[in-house]
Image: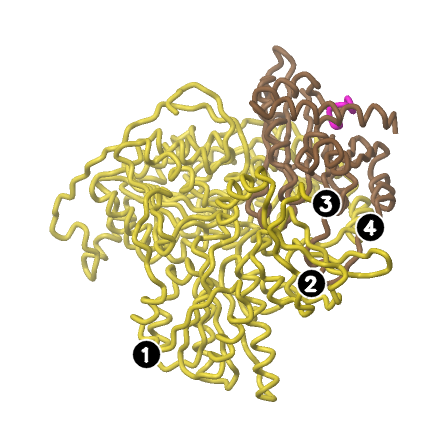
Amino acid sequence: MRKYSILIVGVGGQGIMTTGNILKKVGQRKGWIVVGTETRGASQREGSVDNSVRYVMFDTGEERNERKSVISPLIPIAGADMLIAMETNEALRNAKFTSEKTCILVNLYEIPPPQAVSENWKGATFDEVIKILKTFSPDVRAIKANEIAKREFGDFAMSNIIMLGAALATGNMPVGVDDVKEMLREEGREKAPELLKGFEIGIKEIAELGGE
Amino acid sequence: MNRPGEKLFMLGAEAIARGALEAGVGMVTTYPGTPASEVGDTISEVASDVPGLHFQYATNEAVALENATGGAWAGIRSLCAMKHVGMNVAADPFFTLCYIGVQPGSLVLVNGGDPSCISSTNEQDNRYYALHAHTICLEPSNSQECKDFTLKAFELSEKFDLPIILNAVPRTLHGIGEVTLGKLTPPKAEGQFKKAPGKYVSATLVAVGNKGRLLSRIQRAEKAAGEMPELNRIIPGEAKTGVITAGSEFNYALEALDALGIRDFPILKLGMVYPINPELIERFSQNLEKIIVVEELEGFIETEIKKMLFEKKTLREVRGKDLFPAVSELNTDIVIRGMSKATGIKEPVDYSGIQAKYSKALAKALQRNPSMCPGCPHRATGYALKKAAQQYIESEGMGQVVFGGDIGCYATLVLPPYSMQDWIVCMGAGFNIAAGMSFKVNDTMVGLIGDSTFIHAGIPGLISAVYNNANVMVVIMDNKWVGMTGGQPTPATGINSLHQEVAPAVSLRDIARACGVKYVRTFDPYNIRHAIEIITEALEEKGVRVLISERECALPAKRRAEPVREAERQKGKYSYYAIDPDRCQNCEECYRRLACPALSRKEENEKEFAYLEDARCTLCGACKEVCRSGMAITKTLVNPHVK
């Protein structure tokens, strides 16, 4: 039996719930036990949003022992295998859920909280963010998903799908690129070609980053 | 919808709704409240497809429960959903309903707890309502149990003639899990009320008689709880230490035990947290020396266990609140730490090492407090109130304006840069406390209240304020919807509970007048300059004044306007607000003191100026109202193809 936990974090409106739903459905299709949470309400109030996706995977014929298969929908401290952070402040805020086994994928994009603007607070620089995340895990990969989305599609809407492609391309996850592509085709309907394009761009970004 | 055997992912709240539909629920009433709102919302989405199912949003939880009681006494399976503090409002009918019973129908009361007060003012532990009122409380651990326990709750309600509490927390209600669907049951459309002299009247000696009967019903339930493996079950183990747990804590306990490498502790999972069967406890603890009770908030189960073991004279070591805090929610890590303390097994994670690293990371992360959305009318109202109050104090030369706050999105006015609400307690307390205080202080008292909160709890307080000559200005922040919980309708919205048709909308102005208030004024908060005038005039008066700040919540308004804006964009023209960097004097009024999230400061060519992000703007115009540079912010209709 294997567990795999994915923590997706960011700010309301960044498509975190969508990304989480896709990964949950892919896991369900594979016949795994899937549990997780979603933040509600805060997404519409400029708040922090997180979505956890936890897979419990049994080998064929393996006995499903409750003592091993019942887990919290919340990911424990140092318990995330993959952290997909759509925003830099949220990446820092959720660092405690990572450890040296975690693959951290961070979108170098900042949404200053409204209070930061009115009170004139300054956030960490992107270099500082990467440096701090590296104290938690050696595997930190950073891409500018919002910048890429704006360039390729004209706005930020595809940034979460680009990040999803990048996450799959790390090879760290038990789901495959094709599993997710199939889900995007089905769930996306008329938007599917655009989603697949964004997904491929994300895959390419990680390939170009190399093994960082 | 009716696809028994199919496996779907659902939120716990959705699974409860599904369970109710499979049970043939004929009546669902609710008042929105996190984390229980989705139960009612899910039913509202399908109710028009279920002939015979009556769904309604009620004005408050007492009304909701009383309405549902009507359904139960007419022989209908009824469900009532609310958040934990809502139970306090419903408590009045609830206690006596337990005395009288729910027959010939049944009633399930879904209670959404909120440990860690994720969106609440307290984290009260509502299991005590079951103990206090002598009824049954079930607590599911995951989405499948949310559905199964709902069906079971209706059965128990009928069997023991009691309203059943179904208690769940945000991690369960907003947690996702797989649910195997069962068969849907059509509800009984028509009920029947059989007159039975004295049966439904609980007063004086009749009430005392009812109490006796109630105690025997709950005792029968306690006995039956010993033979309910579908609710209460034991995972066997050979060790001398056992674990008793329930609800969401079951998930944390199992993951914690596994993390500590503990494979042999027997585990008693209680699906019915009240009443607990003493023989079951005796059976479970036969060969044990130590029991660890893993529960969130108060030591409710722990106290019951200790009481039972004491009465049976089989004293054991029982651990609980000494290991797991009574404040805030539990999680796997907290349970690991408590278990490690109880067993001496080393923690598998270096918590203090991680905390040291994490404090550094957290210090660099900007704090993200909830804020009002771009275009929120409450922001404009808050700005106008603050400005008018400041000017009023300056003109008076002394004194202070005290703001009583209440429950809703406008509660975020408590945060900087507004820092306005002096207290937030519960529904309706904003201006009621202010009114009470006005008899004892000379300050200028203002109470803020939302439209839905006003209908829920404000009306009696307003009548009292007039009747008793309080000196308070009540500002009703009327944004037409129950905003914070996801936009449910109210009787003042203009649509019915199923988001259909146009119900006659109740007029808040008429209500205020009917409460006896002579001074009632209405204004549009987007017109900030006018709003400041109206507020200033009202501040100078005495007695009870009601100001209604009337403007729809930006979210549904934006959703409706989107297709229109999109069509305009396609045609190549759309209206938008723009800030001219040359005209902007960087007075900071818009992005610092109005503080709309669409506004920020930008620096270019050594000049600092305000910047408006078009994608987030809802065209409310509030920034234009507060701009001191006059012409810096303009609204234009532009064809972007013409350069």
**Span of residues in magenta:** A166-171
Query: Outermost residue toward the top?
Result: A61
Q: In the rendered view, does B321 fall on the left or right side of B205?
A: right
Label 1, residues with CA under 10 Å away: few <14, some 14-19, many ≥20: few
Q: Quadrant of the C terminus of chain B?
A: top right
Residue B78 vs residue A168, the one in the foreground: A168
> Chain A drawn in what color?
brown
- Whether label 3 touches label 4, CB < 8 Å: no
The residue under label 4 is: A124
Could you say whether the residue bearing mark 4 is in a helix, strand or loop? loop
Q: Is residue A173 magenta?
A: no
Instruction: Name the quadrant of the N terminus of chain B.
Output: top left
Question: Which SS class for mark 2?
Answer: loop
Amino acid type, callout 3: Glu
Q: Are marks 1 and 2 on the same chain?
A: yes
**Structural distance between the alpha carbons of marks 4 and 2:** 31 Å
Say what secondary structure mark 3 lies in. helix
Camera-nearest residue between B624 and B600: B624
Q: CA separation, marks 3 and 4?
A: 11 Å
The verdict on a common chain for dots 3 and 4 is: yes
Q: State which mark lies toward you, 2 or 3.
A: 2
Task: Give the residue at x 45% y 43%.
Answer: B167
Snapshot quadrant of residue B580: bottom right
Q: What's the residue at 59%, 30% (across, down)?
A: A21
Depth check: give the residue in front, B553 or B41: B553
The image shows residue B54 at horizontal and vertical percentages of: 29, 40
Q: Which residue is mark 3?
A: A90
Circles 1 and 3 in contact, beta carbons < 8 Å:
no
Q: Quadrant of residue A13?
A: top right
Q: Nearer the viewer, mark 4 or mark 2?
A: 2
Q: Is B515 displayed left or right of B409 in the figure?
A: left
The numbered mark at residue B632 is: 2
